[in-house]
Image: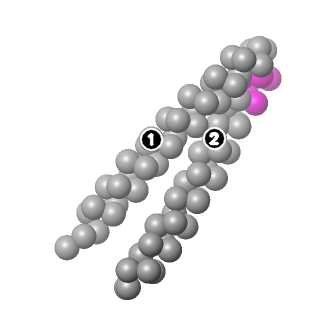
Amino acid sequence: MTSSIHLMFLALLLAVITLFCTLVGAAAGLLARIDGATYATALLRGAVAFAGSATLSLALLTFAVTAGRP
């Protein structure tokens, strides 16, 4: 594959990771709010879930890209 295809594939993966992490954060915040947490606490729980899923996803992406190199 050419370099531009690699960059386009990487940009697509980053967009998918961002969407996934946003959905995880929103779901965590919603579940916290349904559980009776205040708005501030629910927002904080959603932010922590977003950050955790983003860290894990980017670590796995880095591992996959590094392992794929010859």
Query: Left or right of 33: which side holds 21?
Result: left
Q: Quadrant of residue 55?
A: top left
The image shows residue 11 at horizontal and vertical percentages of: 52, 66
Q: Please name the residue shown 38% across and 48% down the image.
A: 59
Q: Is residue 35 visible?
A: no
The image shows residue 20 at horizontal and vertical percentages of: 61, 50
Q: Which residue is mark 2?
A: 24
The image shows residue 48 at horizontal and vertical percentages of: 56, 28
Circle nearer the viewer, 1 or 2: 1
Query: Left or right of 15: which side holds 30?
Result: right
Q: Is residue 51 visible?
A: yes
Q: Main secondary structure of the magenta part?
A: helix
Query: Left or right of 1: which side holds 12?
Result: right
Q: Is residue 63 above or below residue 30?
A: below
Q: Is residue 32 magenta?
A: yes
Q: Helix, strand or loop at disc 1? A: helix
Q: Decide: few, some or many residues near mark 1? Use Cα within 10 Å; few <14, some 14-19, many ≥20.
A: few
Residue type of the residue flagged with mark 2: Val
Q: Please name the residue shown 33% across and 63% down the image.
A: 65
Q: Which residue is mark 1?
A: 55
Residue type of the residue flagged with mark 1: Thr
Screen quadrant of the N terminus: bottom left
Q: Which residues are magenta?
A: 30-34
Q: Quadrant of residue 31?
A: top right
Residue nearest the observer in this picture, 49 or 7: 7
Q: How is the image coloured?
A: one colour
- Residue lying farthest front? 4
Residue nearest the observer in this picture, 2 or 37: 2
The image shows residue 50 at horizontal and vertical percentages of: 58, 37
